[in-house]
Amino acid sequence: MLVAGKTGETKMPMTNQAAIFLPVLALVLLTFVAFLRMGAARAAVMKGDFDPEYYKAHLGEPEPAPARAAARHWDNLFEFPTLFYAACITAFALGAVGGWTLAFAWGFAIARWAQSLVHMTHNNPAHRGLAFVLGIVLCMALWINVAISIFRIL
């Protein structure tokens, strides 16, 4: 649908506001994948000689590295991405979802997937850090974009 401007000129088509939830769904999928991976890593540990009493209060000898890395990965998905979710919901609520908003949101989701793929495979901190920093920059850009929309409304 094209929108007519004040003097009758034709502007760019309006963005479907619900499209902001596609990168959100991509991150939700990643979170479930991380949960399954954590469960599989912990199940593998339990088949070995690891003491299951550790999981009562997470005290004592720490989990073996693969299970600990999977659990840390799961935890990470509930830390910084909350700012991403908040920005997407805010943009939707304000009707401020546009091309840049979607580009920044998709960029963040892709950067998080890249970071997670590194974390779940060879876990090279330099590679993971690059994806992390890119995600931070994209989320900051997303929030700047949302903030501009907020100030335009005020």
Image: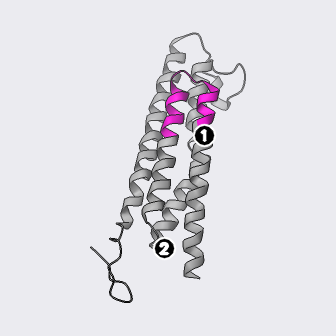
Q: Is residue 93 magenta?
A: no
Task: Reply above or below: 14 against 141.
Answer: below
From the top left corner, tell me how far across and down residue 56 is, in percent: 63, 30
Which residue corresponds to the image point at 58% horizontal and 24% vertical from the top-left? Answer: 123
Q: Quadrant of the C terminus?
A: bottom right
Could you tell me how many numbered marks the image carries? 2
From the top left corner, tell me how far across and down residue 88 is, in percent: 49, 60
Whether pointer 1 and pointer 2 mark residues with C-beta atoms closer than 8 Å, the reply is no
Q: Amino acid at mark 2?
A: Leu
Gap in angstroms between the C-alphas marked 1 and 2 = 28 Å
| Secondary structure of the residue carrying numbered label 1 | helix
Task: Reply above or below: 2 against 140.
Answer: below
For mark 1, what is the residue? 132
Q: Is residue 129 magenta?
A: yes
Q: Main secondary structure of the magenta part?
A: helix
Marker disc for residue 40: none
| Secondary structure of the residue carrying numbered label 2 | helix
Q: Read off the magenta span.
A: 112-130
Label 1 crowd bin: few (<14), some (14–19), many (20+), radius 10 Å? many
From the top left corner, tell me how far across and down residue 47 is, in percent: 50, 13
User: Residue farthest to the top?
Assistant: 49
Which residue corresponds to the image point at 37% horizontal and 60% vertical from the top-left? Answer: 19
For mark 2, what is the residue? 94
